[in-house]
Amino acid sequence: MINLAEPCRPPGNFVTRLLLLLSCAFTCVAQAASENRVIVVDPYLELHTGPGRGYPIFHVVERNESVTLLRGKTDWIKLRTADGKEGWAYRDQMERTLAPSGERLRFTAQTAEDYQRRRWELGLLGGDYGGAALITIYAGYTFTPTLSAEFSASQALGDFSTATMAHLNLLSHPFPTWRYSPFFTLGAGGVRTEPRVTLVQARDRSDPTAHVGVGVRTYLTRRFIFRAEYKHHVVFTGIDERNEDIDEWKAGFAFFF
């Protein structure tokens, strides 16, 4: 690792100082490059033209050859071979390579960085909606690390009725870099309630809703997230000017890309 505790302080005239500073710079670059160089341990390492199995393999790096790490994208690492070829290798295979120190590589930090840079997210959650079993699917888009939007579709199965809901939500993530990151949500949508049993004057209803909520999410591994949340819904029934308050609890997993 580059030691910044004792910087170069070359004495002498301007030319001498410049030459020594350039020497220090070249040494730092060489040290940084060596930290990104790894040794292939598997019999071979396949390089693809892009970050995915659908991209063709165009080169194979043999055992004991060195490659330089350039950057990561989800489950793929971009590399440069000793003869200048650049391609993408699958993360699982890269974790069987060795650093110059002889230690095996770990790419958790890079994957966490991918999570911070995510744009799209798909998830499945389950829980409770006013005493009824609830299942929700959602799709989200991240505008900035602290702001995202989601569209969700849910169904709640109660003893006497079934509720089908669709909501558009705006989420605020005040601490996006925390491992357990809290978020706040505000949204609106609609709910359609269908009776499951024959009751006097029972009928299907469609009502607008609004909600506020709070939750927490954490990055698990690779492309997966766990999240749990609470929402308080207000259903505007329009019946005798009375609104309906419903509490919702749910948790589940999401996949980002």
Image (cartoon, grey):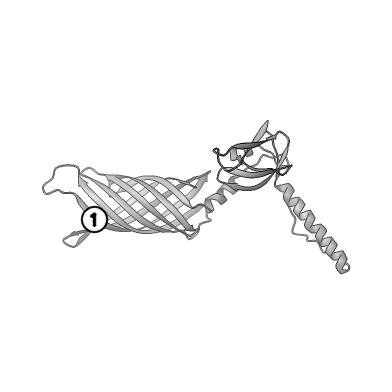
What residue sits right under mark 1 in the picture?
A: 207
The residue most toward the bottom is 13
* Label 1 packing within 10 angstroms: few (<14), some (14-19), many (20+): some
Name the quadrant containing residue 24.
bottom right
Task: State the residue at coordinates (82%, 58%).
Answer: 23
Q: Where is residue 18 in the image (x, y as percent from the top left)?
A: 83, 64
Count the labels in the image.
Answer: 1
The residue most toward the left is 200
The residue most toward the top is 43
- Front one among 133 and 37: 37
Q: Position of residue 111 (x, y in %)?
A: 56, 47
Q: Where is residue 79 in the image (x, y as percent from the top left)?
A: 66, 44
Type of amino acid at the residue the image marks with label 1: Asp
- The answer, for residue 193, to whether it is visible in the render is yes
| On screen, residue 230 above or below 89 | below
Q: Position of residue 139 (x, y in %)?
A: 41, 50
Whether residue 214 sits left or right of residue 131 in the image: it is right
Task: State the residue at coordinates (67%, 33%).
Answer: 44
- Front one among 10 and 18: 18
| On screen, residue 150 above or below 67 | below
Whether residue 31 sits left or right of residue 162 in the image: it is right
Name the quadrant containing residue 64.
top right
Task: State the residue at coordinates (30%, 46%).
Answer: 155
Tell me the element at label 1. Answer: strand
- The answer, for residue 95, to whether it is visible in the render is no
